[in-house]
Amino acid sequence: MHSTLVGYFLWVFFNVFFNTICIVFFDVNITKSLSVEGGVVEKEEAAMTEPMHGLKIRGMRSVDSSLSQCVKLGGSDLPALHSDGDVVIGGFFPLHYVVTEPQHSYNIFLIYSFYQRAFRWMMTMVFAVEEINHNSSLLPGVKLGYHIMDCCDHIPTGLQALFSLFRHSKTSSTCLYYSPVPAVIGLASSSPTRAVAHTLGPFNIPLVSYFSTCTCLTDKHLYPSFLRTVPSDLFQVRGLVKLVTFLGWFWVGTIGTTDDYSLYGGCVAFHLTIPTSPTMAEIQEMTDTLESSTARVVVVFATEGKLLNLFSELAQRNVTGIQWIASEAWVTSSRLASPQFLHILQGTLGFTFPGVSIPGLKEFLLNVRPSPKPGMEFFNMFWEEHFGCNFRYNPGSEDLRNTDSSYSDVSQVRISYNVYKAVYAIAHALHTFLNCDSAGPSGGLCEKHSSFSNGQFLHHLKMVNFHNQFDEKVYFDTNGEPVPLYDIINWQKDSKDEIRFIKVGTYDGSAPQREQLQIIKNSIVWTKGQLQVPVSQCSAPCPPGNRQATRQGEPKCCFDCLPCADGEISNKTGSTECTKCPEYFWSDKDKVKCVAGEEEFLSFYDTMGIILVALTLLGFILTSIITIIFHSFRNTPIVKANNSEISFLLLLSLKLCFLCSLVFIGQPSWWTCRLRQAAFGISFVLCLSCLLVKTIVVLLAFRTSISGSRGWKLFGTSQQRILIICTTAPQICLCSGWVLGAPPFPFRNPNYQALTGKIVVECKEPWPPGFYLLLGYIGLLAFVCLLLAFFGRKLPDTFNEAKFISFSMLIFWAVWISFIPAYVSSPAKFSVAVEIFAILASSFGLLLCIFVPKCYIILLHPERNIKKGMIGKYQR
């Protein structure tokens, strides 16, 4: 590739240098020495090809002799259409289209034909020049002329025509001050345009192209005098990307894409490059790819000539359902819009240049007539090609009004309009350059003594800015580019089953981003005549509540849909990430919106809450029944022997122990959080204080060596009350200080949302040691009670209350020792349930171990409820 480019530039340099020397010093005709190349058919070249009637093939000839028949008609000068004027504008048009095809190593076949559309472009230039000459407000007193030549869309022929143009202009006596041609309009394709622009650049002679779209021509270092009235391919690529993105197509195939078109940001399912001369096997392979691909949208930056074989194969296989996106190179091709391809190309969508109807142009074109006069060779060639006749034997009795062809179809001209704008741009630049608006010696006419040297005219041409009769603003930006305007064309079938090119939108690359693409979706007919936008996707967009996870090693639009995690949502189709819900909010079941988190606490209506409430009420009722029994039999020995006052106080504390568990159930509030632990701590300490007193009384009654009367005086009723108060007071002080200093408060704990999706409403303890101090003091009293009761375990069976106290304390310790790890490890409301269970279990243990045996004697064995029965066994 590098060596090819180097060879090309060296070839251009030596040809330019050598021809310039010959023209300036010897004024000799060197065109015969230029060799002919095969010429690479670029995008613009094949875009110009239409049905070429009367195609001629010359075989087994040298290339030079064949080319001479294409561009040279006798004499030393190339044929040209010329009109004298005060200022002569050059023009290059590909009136002949040349392609060389090597069939064998020693043969070259030359295929060429007269190109009628290019002839129309040429005649549009002539029309514009004559229109300006009849316009008294533009270039008054100055007559424009033209010198138009055939470049054959070929690099050597284009350079040959260029040298012929300037040799002619130097000897013309009509040019202002013997100046060269001030500007040249041409060419149609990028390769010849680059060669000519590279030649004209050092001389600051403007070259204004009407159809060369290569982005490479934007380089002002290589092509300083190049301008164009057709937008660069770069704008078309951006527009097509916007179109594809706007329609939601992110999984597409591409055909014929070059480096300039690699800007597409979507997913490419496949990329096909059509060779210059594809074999049937290559065509079939590309067709197989198109037929098997899941991409239903294909963007084509190829040319009509290159696409013909591919579309023929697709039509033969009846491969339908593909939505074609066309570049301007083939979107208005009448050949591809023929009935042969209707079933596969209906609904094609693409960009093309804005089309207008130029007033008077059609009548001007229809007035063309052949003539044997010198300088009319192009007219005669057109006539022979159009009517399939030989002008030498038929002097031209035909009438163009009786024919219908691409030449006379000027309802919406596009390339011709670019030529028209180029002529007017040069005229407006001349108007400024020649001071046509200033009043001077010429009386308002233009100053004809101006010289076109030093690049002054190029500067004026770059600064041109005007509105034409179609209300389009014509100007060039800093790169010599026009306003990037495109029409969006849709191929729609009419009632005659013929394709019509319908405008369905526009693209303006100079507008703000959101206003560049304007399209009427409901007016588009899609592939196979569908009215709904086709779907082309590797993976269907993930619905809300899911996120897209790209598959490893595959394009980014090939993905799997994964549901959002709990606590996260996605509320849009095609989300790539899930959004985490704010604190205290949680995702709904569909993961599409965040809702207020469900609050969780141990409710009275939960199954667990109902069971615990039932046990609480059972314990309270049993305690109340026992209290009634004891009160009813308060004068019996068994009740009196157990210190009835302490027994009733113990039963009261047990009632409080049972009832305090209810404070733990239900939604935590300001008062329940302060009350629950204090009520639990104080009621249990009161209960244990009573047990401690009862244990001491029992031990004093049976173990002390002091006489009974003296023992009871030392630990009588008053002392017992004082001991209960003294042992309960520290817990009351601790709870009071805790509640007043650092009170627990209701707290919505979001830490469990990730596990349960719920917000746990709990009582938060700002001073955790408070609870453990409360529990520790209860444990201390329980340990003292257990120790004293253990000492009295061998008292007489008839009245062994110490043994029952020992059992109750063992149950108490077993419950609360197992409580601590269970409480710490239990989550959310279960920790509250564990604490309630511990309270109830220890309360039931005390109630059943201490009071049920006595109730058994009172109710079932009253004969033992006598004073003798209480001490009988001890006496034995």
Image: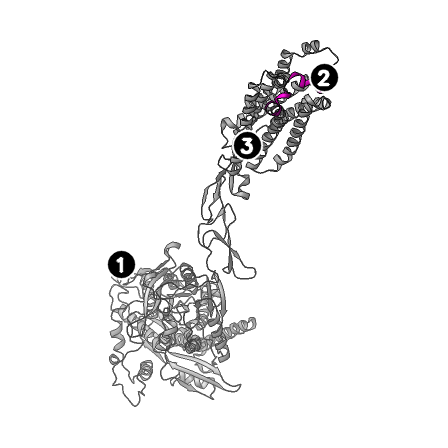
Answer whether residue 528 is magenta in the image: no
Residue 326 seen: no
Camera sees residue 684: yes
Residue lying farthest to the front in this orientation: 863
Q: CA distance from mark 1 to mark 3?
A: 115 Å
Name the chief secondary structure element in magenta: helix
Q: Which residues are magenta?
A: 856-876
Instruction: Tell me the quarter of the image containing the N terminus.
Output: bottom right
Disc on res. 439: 1
**Disc 2 designates what residue?**
702
Q: Quadrant of the C terminus?
A: top right
Q: Nearer the viewer, residue 600 or 867?
A: 867
| Above or below: residue 697 compared with residue 327 | above
Task: Give the residue at x 47% y 70%.
Answer: 256
Could you say which is closer to the camera, residue 452 or residue 304? 304
Q: What kind of element bears circle 2?
A: helix
- 779 vs 351, nearest the viewer: 779
**Residue 417 appears in which quarter of the rendering?**
bottom left
Residue 615: assigned label: 3
Q: Nearer the viewer, mark 1 or mark 3?
A: 3
Mark closer to the observer (2, 3): 2
* Residues at circles 2 and 3 in contact by the CB criterion of under 8 Å: no
Q: Nearer the viewer, residue 365 or 180?
A: 365
* Picture quadrant where residue 618 is located: top right
Label 1 Cα neighbours within 10 Å, binned few <14 / some 14-19 / many ≥20: few
Element marked by disc 1: loop
Q: Amino acid at mark 2?
A: Phe
- Marked residue nearer the N-terminal end (1 or 2): 1
Place residue 80 in its image quadrant: bottom left
Looking at the rendered structure, the kind of residue marked 3 is Leu
Q: CA distance from mark 1 to mark 2?
A: 143 Å
Labels 2 and 3: the sequence-earlier one: 3
